[in-house]
Amino acid sequence: MKSYNVIIAGVGGQGIILASELLALAAMEAGYDVKKSEVHGMSQRGGDVVSHVRFSEKVYSPLIEQGTCDLILAFEKAEALRYLHYLKPGEGVVVMNDLEIIPLPVTAGEDTYPENVEETIRNYANLVVVDAIKRAKELGNPRVANTIMLGVASRFFDIPEDVWIRVISNRVPRKTIEVNRKAFQLGRSIS
Amino acid sequence: MRLLLSGNEAIARGAWEASCHVASAYPGTPSTEILENIAFYKEIKAEWAPNEKVAFEAMLGASIGGARALVAMKHVGLNVAADPLMTSAYTGVNGGFVIISADDPGMHSSQNEQDNRIFARFAKIPLLEPSDSQEAHDFVKLAFEISEKYDTPVIVRTTTRISHAKGIVEVDDRKEVPIREYRKNPEKYTMIPAYARRRHEILENRLETLKNLSNSIEINRIEEGDNEIGIVASGIAYQYAREVFPEATFLKLGMPFPFPDDLFRKFSSMVKKIYVVEELEPFIEEQIRILGFEVTGKEKIPNTGELNPQIVRKALKNEDLQGIPVQKSVKRPPAMCPGCPHLGIFFELKKKRINVMGDIGCYTLAVLPPIESIDTTVDMGFSVSSVHGFNMARGESSAKKSVAVIGDSTFVHSGITGLIDIVYNRGFSTVIILDNHTTAMTGHQPHPATGRTIRGEPTKKLDFVELARAIGVEDIHVVDPHDLKATRKALKEALNYPGPSVIITDRPCVLLPDEWKKLQKNPKKVVDQELCQGDKCGNCFRLGCPAIVWKNGKAFIDPLLCVGCDLCIQTCPFDAIHPEDET
Ligand SMILES: Cc1ncc(C[n+]2csc(CCOP(=O)(O)OP(=O)(O)O)c2C)c(N)n1
């Protein structure tokens, strides 16, 4: 059984916790031991949000050690950079939403938004950039952007597709099961 | 059945299975979800209490009344409940009594990172420390049994990474335990000195018995590996140490107090070198040193902040797996929400350069730029009592320039006695109650002034105006904080009033579902780029509304973030902001 360390990162309100819940449930259904960790509370008020998900034969720490992460699933570009040093040097993967969310300190002129995010990441990792919101709109529901992102990431894990579909169908609103299934499969076909 | 549960969900499930009958708490990260989840089980009477002391006492009362009772709180909550805690160790229990203390190493959402394991030693009651969700579930059940068998309250201590991390839990069904008979027994439950002296003896003897339990209980165990290195660990630190030392021999402590002396002696004879891996205080290390053993602990492992596997690896193996340098990202501090009802009052306080004795809640974020209006934050209720002291120090004129700000939930928690102090001692301070109709910070729990219980049932609503009047406050103002003119007027009058004043800013949190729906109907606001004076003015930006951003030296309102309130319109001296449909 393989071991996976996955970081899911983004900004408060983007649905990080649900995405990490779906990954953890899919891994559990697929027979792995799973742990995941994130922080609730203060950090949700527009701040950055991160969830660590680990699955393998047996998991001890719920936190991923720096230098051991297999994949970063980033819903926002600067958030991918924030955790880049967690990746395994040379063999890590970054699946990144093509989206910039500008925080207050940048607006206030106290900080600058990082430039050349994609080049920086490519120096250290394999990068897949996904225009998830545009793709989701094409499917008729901008809110399935996260499901597309999960679909892209899913190709890198040994979890059967039917397990994914089952877990997602159990968790999303009834009326959106079909569009979420399509979104997941669309993501899974992106390379 | 196997479920993916957070530590908090697992505690709730374990309590239900253990036939917990009643539970109470005051919210506080990272403990809040324990009661929220317990409230889903109809067999358990679940309540939000006004504060942790009340929750604790209610549950001790329930235990004396024969029920299995659970009380949950964040670490600093146990400070508030410390008075009954210390003496409950003397009285002991009737029905099982379990205290959950959820600590926050690293202060993800707290004002300090005290290590509450020390409370167990201080009160002389047993301490269980789960290291994952499964143990959180199992240990709560065990805690009820220990509590009844040994006639003692039991502390189950989690940390943020236990409470909020999820793992797979094998769950069970509820096994109903009847409410125990209540027999009057003042010598056990009435702690006058004569009886308390006897109970103290009993407590000391009980501690000896519990030490035997600690030496033999299954959750304190030696996990044999190679004999070069032996590691003593409990709670989340065990998992980090396991990650870094997969081959070592472990003394895994699920019950670190009372300390299992004999078990430790056996363990120490099996290994060449001993490391103690623990977060925050050298709690285990000190107990080992008292036995006369040399170990490596806090000389290598930091006693501030959270641990994680890389800290443990660097400290004890001098290794670092990180190969990619840390990249510069961007600061993303938490902020109050667009349209937050707290924004208006701080805008006015900042403008007048008022000294603001602050408190704890979403509004504490007003200390950060661009609002920067709060002078102090210490503990819940501090604002009200401390503004009185501050004005005592600085004289009557200080009251014209100083206020206390306190949230509605926090005021109920521990602001009321402070207000009584101001009135009783002929003070002249101004107290501003930020009434957003909820406990927003911890995720919107109801409280006594919302008129709803934990399960949403209607109940008596605490009326702040009547309360203030009953306390003896004569100058009382109720304002809508989204009406800046009215807010300004109330502030001016209250500050100049020669006596105590109370201002209640009355407007629901924008994230409350009803309020959110209402706001959706409002037109978004836009900035006329011609009229906006941009960098020369910056007035609207000082409001601290995250929807107002700066583009090319001018204000711009992000339509995705704007909730359609009209606070910003009132801040603009050039009439540059208006509703979108009017442009
Ligand atoms: C003794 C103690 N208990 C609980 C907490 C956690 N906590 C901090 S502020 C707060 C209440 C916030 O509600 P309110 O005062 O209504 O302000 P709001 O967040 O709604 O603006 C809570 C529960 C704490 N810091 N200290």
Image: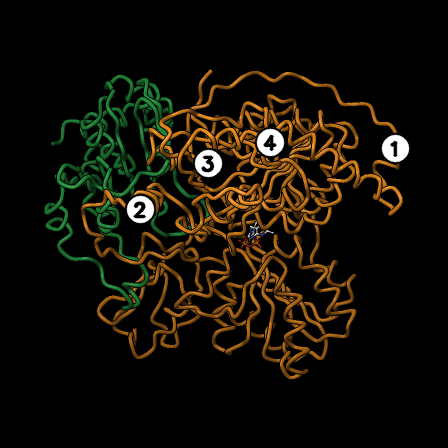
Chain colours: A green, B orange
What is the crowding at mark 4: few (fewer than 14 residues within 10 Å), some, or many (at least 20)?
many
| Residue at 84% over, 44% down | B197
What is the crowding at mark 1: few (fewer than 14 residues within 10 Å), some, or many (at least 20)?
few
**Image check: A111 left or right of B387?**
left
Where does residue B549 sit, x and y in percent of width and height?
30, 63
Chain letter of disc 2 in the image: B
Q: Earlier in the sequence, mark 3 or mark 1?
A: 1
The CA span between labels 2 and 3 is 18 Å
Please tell me whether residue B395 is drawn above or below residue B226 in the rendered image.
below
Do pointers 1 and 4 mark residues of a single chain? Answer: yes
Residue B2 position by quadrant: top left
Q: Are marks 1 and 4 in contact (CB under 8 Å)?
A: no
The amino acid type of the residue labelled 1 equals Asn
Name the residue carrying label 3: B232
Name the residue carrying label 2: B314
Name the residue carrying label 4: B39
Quadrant of the image for the C terminus of chain B? bottom left
| Residue at 13% over, 48% down | A118
The amino acid type of the residue labelled 4 equals Ala
Q: Earlier in the sequence, mark 1 or mark 2?
A: 1
Do pointers 1 and 2 mark residues of a single chain? Answer: yes
Chain letter of disc 4 in the image: B
